[in-house]
Amino acid sequence: MQYIKSDLSSALDSAGHPLIEMGDQRGSLLILPYGARVLGLFSISSENFYWVNPMLVNAMDTETFFSSTGWKNSGGDRTWIAPEINLFIKDSNDPWNSYEVPASIDPGDYVIQSNNGTLMMTRQKLPFII
């Protein structure tokens, strides 16, 4: 299902996770600072080229999404590690209920800085605890 860019932006703004938009009259790119994800790639038709988690288009659902524990699949563009079955599935007899992404693979703690129209996304260093 496709979502309207303004609905996505509005829900994320309300939940305290505003998107960063870059673009021109031909289209735009929406970046979600959480996870440094390109969450939207829109042409002038406003159709997103990426899948977006349905919880991110309603303000109440978006707040629930970000307050939940564990890995948060916002959607968008990303690189993935394979084979998933060896890394993310704890019980091969019950793959859909035992799928778990380790937080260390996708920590979501990024800082985005803008300098003269260039964005730099840097992962924050987590404290090392022994």
Image (cartoon, rainbow, N blue to C red):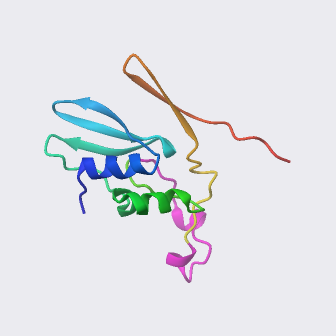
| Of the pair 106 and 63, the residue shown nearer to us | 63
Instruction: Judge whether 63 appears above or below 115 on screen.
Output: below
Residue 95: image x %, image y %? Answer: 52, 77
The span picked out in magenta is 78-98
The residue lying at 39 percent from left, 62 percent from top is: 55
- Residue at 47% across / 46% down in the picture? 16
Camera-side residue of 112 and 89: 112
* Residue extending farthest bottom: 93
Residue found farthest to the left: 45
Q: Position of residue 106 (x, y in %)?
A: 56, 50
Judge whether residue 1 is colored magenta.
no
Residue 96 at x, y = what percent? Answer: 49, 76
Q: In x, y percent, where is residue 69?
A: 60, 62
Is 93 included in the stretch rendered in magenta? yes
Seen in the image, is 109 located left or right of residue 47?
right
* Residue situated in front as seen by the camera: 112 or 106: 112
Name the residue located 28 percent from the left edge and 52 percent from the top edge. Answer: 7
Q: Residue at x 70, y 41 (%)?
A: 126
Classify the position of the N terminus by image quarter. Answer: bottom left
Q: Is residue 68 left or right of residue 116?
A: right
